[in-house]
Image (tube, rainbow, N blue to C red):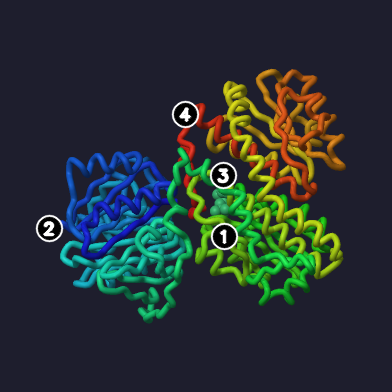
């Protein structure tokens, strides 16, 4: 959940490191720190965002062309300066930054203290600095290797030592690390987005690997036996502009507005309309195995989980598969009975979510075919699944997931049609769904033109204390997602419910302090949702309806209506979710929230 950046080369390290941290700030932002070798090891840290660290560095500039930097999301120990990374050993010669959790840190700390080591923080990370200090016999890489032999848990670390300038040692187990390759300079980052400003040539470290980067080169070896690893360099296809705000006040707004384009990217080259069939290159090698499967278990977290819930209806509509959708954090602890005909589909924007990754590993151990639907190219879930499909949505920086969700749903629709066309779905039906799916970007463009309308709506509801989102079938996961967005960035109480559940309890809550957001697109279930709306309205709450353009039925009940263009019912989530994203965004802005970096959250949840 934290961000790591490292630089060795010929330039002054500090500006490069700060720029790297700014790109990574979305991963964690309660404290930050930097260390360079500038006539000895120098460390500057501060509580708060990167801007606070920059202010510190103005008073105490650091020079040197080798350095490491970290932005933290606290796990062990409060967000204080003492707990911020880098952490150093007793002599202040070794600096360590770390993502992940050292599970046996308490026992190691007791041992180290008994041997005279002085700790200055409450973090699990600091044990690494002292262990490396104890293991040091003249070579930092070997010392890191020996120290890591003593720890249990997850780590992505970058280490440097006074006396070994121009050298950073990296190691990974469970927490991502990427090397960026430049000319006479090398970089390390926990996230590839931080590297594209400098280089597109990257190399992902795998679990249990150690690497050394120097200005003129790098090498990777296996932890344990030291075997050298020769891995092909990858070229990232993102542009620098993809990681900029591009004139928008927030990444979240930029990412909401990018959705027509990101859905086009998700569909590009993947539809053979004549045959009414999608072409998903990443699944071709396992298509025979997929055809033999009778059951699909979809695992994911947060917004990706809601995309999975949409997929349940899609798969049931078009294929003969039975479908279960499970939160990865629950799935991984179930006594799984994965029979031969089960495939597991992991959905993750980052491709690094700890619970989703653990679920994939457990399913693989039990012999299931594991597919991935991932945005971050080269991420751990992308590499560890047997096959998969990329979203090609570009980097999603705002902590609240928006464009990744719609790309996930678009590709899940392709998957459902693909699997369906190998079964009962007719050519005609396949073509009908795909033709309409290709129209979605254009419909979204129209919808996004009405941004001001949503901003005015948010203004009218800015004082609301409780939101209740309701929907049925395809709109049910969108109700959950709409409520999550409000909680996450506006810090306002919101719940998502299946509309049919109202009478089973939640109706008792409703009073004038509640606003109901009812998703009631035209279709078979609309009438039922309209009656739920009547019941809610009768209890005094205010009501916003999200309804199909030109449909007066919802307008007759609700106080306000947001119209979305007409489309197939199965594609309605792709349109309905967008005004809800915008509504949450506008509400959060009005409340002065830090939209891209909401409190207590980080973009990538790489710890359990
Ligand atoms: O990277 P992933 O898709 O695996 O992340 C899953 C969730 O952590 C993520 O969707 C989270 O719920 C978002 N912040 C929601 O906006």
- Any mark on residue 39, and which? 2
Q: Position of residue 248 (x, y in %)?
A: 47, 41
Above or below 228: residue 539:
above
Residue denoted by label 3: 257
Q: As rendered, which of 382 and 208 lies closer to the eye?
A: 382
> Could you tell me how far apart the alpha carbons at marks 2 and 1 are, in whole angstroms?
44 Å
Judged left or right of residue 421, residue 212 is left
Instruction: Tell me, yes or no, whether the two marked residues, 3 and 4, touch with CB atoms within 8 Å.
Output: no
Residue denoted by label 1: 392
Nearer mark to the viewer, of 3 and 4? 3
> Could you tell me how far apart the alpha carbons at marks 4 and 1 are, in whole angstroms?
32 Å
Going from the N terminus, do you reach mark 3 or mark 4 first?
Answer: 3
Q: Position of residue 418 (x, y in %)?
A: 75, 66
Q: Residue at x 59, y 37 (%)?
A: 582
Q: Is residue 303 visible?
A: yes
Q: As rendered, which of 246 and 307 lies closer to the eye?
A: 246
Nearer mark to the viewer, of 2 and 4? 4
Nearer mark to the viewer, of 3 and 1? 3
Q: Residue at x 63, y 32 (%)?
A: 494
- Any mark on residue 592, and which? 4
């Amino acid at each position: 959940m934290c961000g790591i950046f490292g630089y060795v080369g010929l330039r002054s390290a500090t500006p490069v490191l700060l720029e790297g941290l700014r790109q990574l700030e979305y991963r964690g932002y309660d404290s930050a720190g930097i260390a360079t070798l500038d006539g000895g090891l120098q460390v500057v840290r501060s509580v708060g965002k990167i801007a606070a660290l920059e202010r510190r560095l103005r008073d105490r500039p650091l020079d040197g062309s080798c350095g490491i930097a970290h932005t933290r999301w606290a796990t062990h120990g409060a967000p204080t300066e003492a707990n911020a990374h880098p952490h150093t050993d007793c002599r202040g010669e070794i600096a360590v930054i770390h993502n992940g959790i050292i599970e046996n840190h308490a026992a190691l700390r007791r041992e180290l203290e008994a041997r005279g080591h002085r700790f200055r923080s409450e973090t699990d990370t600091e044990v690494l600095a002292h262990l490396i200090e104890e293991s040091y016999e003249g070579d930092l890489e070997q010392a890191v290797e020996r120290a890591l032999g003593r720890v249990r848990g997850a780590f992505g670390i970058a280490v440097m030592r006074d006396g070994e300038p121009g050298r950073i040692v990296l190691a990974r187990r469970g927490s991502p690390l990427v090397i960026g390759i430049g000319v006479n300079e090398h970089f390390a980052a926990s996230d590839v987005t931080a590297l594209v400003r400098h280089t597109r040539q990257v190399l992902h470290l795998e679990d249990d690997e150690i690497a050394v980067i120097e200005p003129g080169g790098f090498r990777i070896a296996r932890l344990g036996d030291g075997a050298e690893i020769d891995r092909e360099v990858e070229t990232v296809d993102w542009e620098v502009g993809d990681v900029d705000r591009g004139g928008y006040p927030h990444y979240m707004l930029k990412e909401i507005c990018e959705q027509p384009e990101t859905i086009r990217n998700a569909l590009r080259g993947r539809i053979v309309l004549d045959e009414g069939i999608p072409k998903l290159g990443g699944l071709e090698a396992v298509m025979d195995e997929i055809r033999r499967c009778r059951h699909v278990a979809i695992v994911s977290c947060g917004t990706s989980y809601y995309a999975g819930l949409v997929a349940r209806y899609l798969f049931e509509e078009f294929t003969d598969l039975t479908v279960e959708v499970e939160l990865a954090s629950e799935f991984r602890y179930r006594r799984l009975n994965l029979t031969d005909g089960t495939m597991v589909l992991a959905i993750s924007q980052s491709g690094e979510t700890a619970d989703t990754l653990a679920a994939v590993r457990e399913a693989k151990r039990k012999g299931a075919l594991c597919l991935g639907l991932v945005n971050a190219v080269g991420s751990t879930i992308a590499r560890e699944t047997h096959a998969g499909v990329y979203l090609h949505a570009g980097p999603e920086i705002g902590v609240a997931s928006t464009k990744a969700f719609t790309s996930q749903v678009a590709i899940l629709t392709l998957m459902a049609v693909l699997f369906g066309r190998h079964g009962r779905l007719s050519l005609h039906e396949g073509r009908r769904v795909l033709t309409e799916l290709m129209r979605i970007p254009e419909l979204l463009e129209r919808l996004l033109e009405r941004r001001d309308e949503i901003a005015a709506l948010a203004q009218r509801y800015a004082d609301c204390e409780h939101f209740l989102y309701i929907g049925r079938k395809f709109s049910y996961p969108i109700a959950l997602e709409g409520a999550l967005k409000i909680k996450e960035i506006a810090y306002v109480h919101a719940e998502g419910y299946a509309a049919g559940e109202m009478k089973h309890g939640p109706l008792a809550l409703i009073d004038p302090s509640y606003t109901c957001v009812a998703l009631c697109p035209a279709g078979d279930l609309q009438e039922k949702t309209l009656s739920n709306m009547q019941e809610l309205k009768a209890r005094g709450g205010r009501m916003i309806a999200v309804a199909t353009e030109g449909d007066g039925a919802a307008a007759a009940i609700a106080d306000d209506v947001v119209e979305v263009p007409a489309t197939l019912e199965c594609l309605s989530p792709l349109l309905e979710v967008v005004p809800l994203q915008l509504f949450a965004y506008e509400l959060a802005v009005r409340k002065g929230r830090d939209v891209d970096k909401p409190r207590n959250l980080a973009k990538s949840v790489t710890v359990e």
